[in-house]
Image (cartoon, coloured by chain):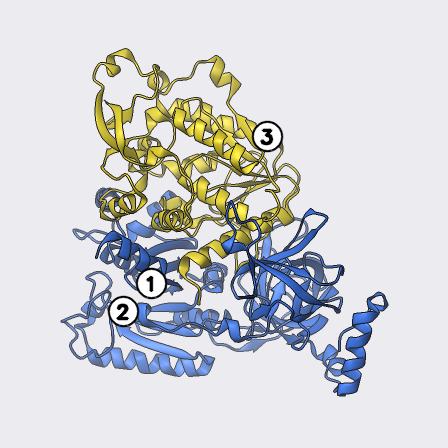
Chain colours: A blue, B yellow
């Protein structure tokens, strides 16, 4: 293939983000090093540096220690462990991949949640000699909690169990039970040896009984498109662009759905309505064309829109289609992952950043904490580092909210400590809190809805709430 | 489904807008290289039809290639952005030279100190940089919004968790955040994007007959008369180009015949040494970059 056709092909590739999780000795870094190495993304000078480092820090004897390719920081190399989230990149003929490499030991649940938050697929490593461990349950729980729908179970170190089909079957079966218990949607099982490269890029001749694809081939062919563009239109306003008196544009990235010029939209939480006047496709902007207008845009495009009416819209607002309004509330049921040494205390004020809005709020009640190992629910008074709990969150202002299960970008938030400014928690909206549900589940008649829309359109100064 | 480059582009634009919306005094580092060119291009998209809502800052070590300076000034004229140029005045007084003082002293004084001075003088609360996670191992672990204390120091063991596309921009007065909008781009992505979008880059990236000398285990270009006499006597003309641009005495040239973008990309794909090989600064010690970042270097 000549370079021009290669570039054309590369230009049209899509992208898959995946997460690798495993406990300390499962060979996770080795697996990633192997994928980078075998897909030829390791350059010779990096490799020679690793060869000399293998002699100093390595744990693999004469073989090149693949883990040293990916364990980034010097202090970690000396300890022989990975302690943070690292991002890795490689490209095959089919796809560009971004790997979030996260640590497996207990105290670092927060790093795993971080890596999982942007991943489409998770690879869970299991040591064939040990089978499903407590960590495996924990990792699977977090992966599922963070909404990853595809889980690849890589049963590693098959060379150390004589490539036994029986071992593979036992572990697959046991994991299947776990996946059912958690409700993980799609699972895939692959027997591998990361150290030797079996079933990583090519099918291994040492496991002829395995009928499925090698790991990399599976990653290349998985269909992970989640019909993001078919969902309801959600547009968190990020930045108001007002270069001159004639242009007042609202910039942002479409979180879900699609939008067309002329569409009727509602701005939340105010409930004010207007129509889309124009859409600027930021991607099509160039040095000469500073106003690239399009008729339609869809997720995850970055755009700038203008509205027919001069209504008050600012950062933190959400623009949605008038015909598909989300619920608006300040009282939400959420799942919270606590990420700070200092415990979460009930009633304390934190800053909650959801999409582009930052609103003060607090957790008024811990419904229950979940033990990530046994999945049991417990009653507790406070949350410590790495605790995961169902809570009632009360904000000082209402927000338009979607459940995380239907919208990953508008259903998620981070918790910021107002004294230290640290990110101390991450949360996912489950739904409206029970206390709020009564009022909002009232069934309105068509006539009532039309009247409400009429008032909001022609009498915006009444600040009438959308129904 | 949009292509990976359009996804990366949208992600970067989102990050740039987040900076403009959340910080009161942001600045974008401009090193004149290809990554800076891509960032500038993305910023021009993010804020169109308006102008950039932040200035560009170039820390001029006074040993940059002359062509880089010409290119920089031309871009500022063409695009109409605010350009701030800073050179460490103490370094100028000391007449710091990489040839005399070595790469470490030169970099410490003219680059690291120069950068700190410029940042302190500007009082910036957000500093946008063009670092990518695929460049170097310690960068692979750094956040997109990377917190720096009052002394510009990075604490690799105490980074804020970063989830989804929600970035924590909260800081105290005097502290700052380094923001890396093209964190998730690879070298190939950058080149491909430059090709696809027709982004202007300095000619130094393309092969041409240039006067070079052997220095510090690599070939460097004779860019001006400050190259020591005894070295200049060994100068010869060769077809070379540069994979990264920096201070000319510290930037290794590679022999090449690539005069077009597709040829550069082809060469890169077939290449057996990683991008930073030509950059002498990283060879000083293992974990050199990690150490420099902890000290306040980008």
Residue at figure coordinates x 61%, y 68% from the top left: A234
Give how far apart the Cα atoms at labels 2 and 3 are.
50 Å
- Image side of residue B254 versus residue A181, left or right: left
Report which quarter residue A178 is drawn in: bottom left
Q: Residue furthest left?
A: A205
- Disc sitting over residue A119 in the figure: none
Residue position for label 3 = B120
Front-lying residue, B138 or A370: B138
Please, what secondary structure does the residue beneath circle 1 have? strand
Front-lying residue, A70 or B232: B232
Q: Nearer the viewer, mark 2 or mark 3?
A: 2
- Residue B176 position within the rendered picture, expressed as x and y whole percent measured from the top left: 59, 40
Residue at figure coordinates x 70%, y 59% from the top left: A359
Q: Residues within 10 Å of mark 3 (few under 14, many from 20)?
A: some
Q: Nearer the viewer, mark 1 or mark 2?
A: 1
Residue position for label 1 = A95
Please, what secondary structure does the residue beneath circle 2 have? helix
Is residue A59 in sight in this rendering? Answer: no
- Disc sitting over residue A217 in the figure: 2
- Residue A11 position within the rendered picture, expressed as x and y whole percent measured from the top left: 36, 57
Report which quarter residue A329 is drawn in: bottom right
The answer to whether mark 2 and mark 3 are in CB contact below 8 A is: no
Q: Nearer the viewer, mark 1 or mark 3?
A: 1
């Amino acid at each position: 293939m000549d370079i021009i056709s290669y570039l054309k092909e590369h230009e049209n590739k899509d992208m898959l983000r995946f997460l690798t999780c495993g406990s300390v000795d499962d060979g996770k870094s080795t697996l990633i090093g192997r994928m980078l190495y075998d897909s030829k993304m390791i350059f010779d000078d990096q490799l020679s540096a690793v060869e000399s480092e293998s002699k100093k820090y390595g744990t693999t004897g004469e073989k090149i220690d693949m883990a040293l390719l990916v364990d980034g920081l010097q202090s970690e190399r000396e300890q022989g462990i990975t302690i943070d989230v690292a991002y890795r990149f490689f490209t095959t003929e089919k796809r560009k991949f971004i790997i979030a490499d996260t640590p497996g030991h207990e105290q670092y649940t927060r790093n795993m949640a971080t890596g999982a938050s942007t991943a489409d697929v998770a690879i869970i490593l299991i040591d064939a000699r040990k089978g499903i461990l407590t960590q495996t349950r924990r990792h699977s729980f977090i992966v599922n909690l963070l909404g990853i729908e595809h889980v690849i179970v890589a049963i590693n170190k098959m060379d150390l169990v004589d490539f036994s089909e029986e071992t593979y079957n036992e572990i697959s079966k046991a994991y299947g039970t776990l996946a059912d218990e958690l409700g993980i949607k799609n699972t895939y099982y692959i027997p591998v040896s990361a150290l030797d490269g079996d079933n990583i890029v090519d099918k291994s001749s040492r496991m002829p009984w395995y009928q499925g694809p090698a790991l990399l081939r599976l990653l290349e062919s998985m269909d992970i498109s989640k019909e993001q563009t078919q969902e309801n239109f959600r547009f968190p306003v990020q930045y108001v662009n007002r270069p001159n008196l004639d242009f007042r544009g609202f910039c942002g990235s479409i979180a879900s759905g699609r939008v067309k010029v002329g569409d009727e939209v509602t701005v939340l939480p105010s409930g004010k309505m207007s129509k889309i006047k124009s859409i600027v496709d930021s991607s099509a902007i160039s040095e000469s064309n500073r106003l690239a207008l399009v008729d339609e845009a869809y997720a995850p495009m970055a755009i700038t829109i203008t509205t027919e009416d001069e209504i008050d819209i600012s950062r933190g607002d959400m623009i949605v289609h008038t015909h598909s309004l989300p619920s608006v509330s300040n009282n939400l049921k959420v799942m919270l992952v606590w990420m700070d040494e200092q415990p979460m205390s009930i009633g304390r004020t934190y800053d909650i950043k959801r999409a582009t809005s930052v609103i003060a709020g607090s957790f008024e009640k811990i419904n229950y904490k979940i033990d990530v190992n046994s999945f049991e629910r417990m009653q507790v008074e406070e949350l410590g580092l790495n605790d995961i709990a169902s809570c009632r969150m009360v904000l000082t202002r209402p927000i338009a909210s979607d459940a995380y299960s239907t919208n990953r970008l508008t259903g998620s938030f981070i918790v910021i400590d107002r004294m230290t400014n640290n990110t101390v928690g991450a949360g996912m909206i489950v739904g409206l809190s029970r206390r709020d549900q009564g009022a909002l589940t009232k069934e309105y008649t068509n006539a009532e809805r039309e009247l409400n829309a009429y008032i909001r359109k022609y009498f915006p100064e009444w600040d009438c709430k959308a129904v | 489904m949009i292509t990976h480059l359009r996804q990366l582009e949208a992600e970067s634009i989102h990050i740039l807008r987040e900076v403009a919306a959340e910080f009161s005094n942001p600045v974008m580092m401009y090193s004149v290289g290809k990554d800076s060119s891509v960032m500038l291009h993305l910023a021009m998209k993010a804020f169109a039809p308006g102008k950039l809502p932040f200035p560009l800052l170039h820390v001029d070590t006074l040993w940059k290639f002359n062509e880089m300076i010409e290119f920089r000034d031309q871009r500022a004229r063409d695009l109409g952005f605010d350009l701030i140029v800073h050179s460490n005045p103490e370094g100028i007084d000391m007449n710091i030279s990489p040839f005399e003082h070595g790469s470490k002293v030169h970099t410490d004084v003219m680059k690291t100190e120069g950068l700190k001075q410029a940042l302190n003088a500007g009082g910036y609360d957000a500093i946008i940089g063009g670092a990518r996670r695929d460049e170097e191992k310690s960068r692979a672990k750094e956040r997109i919004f990377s917190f720096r204390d009052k002394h510009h120091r990075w604490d690799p063991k105490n980074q804020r968790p970063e989830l989804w596309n929600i970035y924590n921009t909260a800081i105290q007065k005097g502290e700052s955040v380094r923001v890396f909008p093209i964190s998730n781009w690879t070298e190939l992505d950058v080149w491909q994007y430059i090709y696809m979008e027709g982004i202007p880059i300095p000619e130094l990236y393309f092969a041409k007959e240039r006067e070079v000398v052997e220095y510090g285990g690599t070939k460097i270009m004779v860019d001006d008369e400050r190259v020591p006499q005894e070295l200049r006597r060994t100068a010869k003309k060769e077809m070379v180009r540069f994979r990264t641009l920096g201070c000319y005495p510290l930037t290794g040239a590679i022999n090449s015949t690539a005069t077009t973008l597709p040829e550069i990309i082809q060469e890169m794909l077939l290449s057996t040494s990683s991008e930073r090989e030509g950059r002498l600064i990283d060879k000083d010690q293992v974990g050199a970059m990690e150490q420099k970042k902890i000290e306040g270097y980008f």
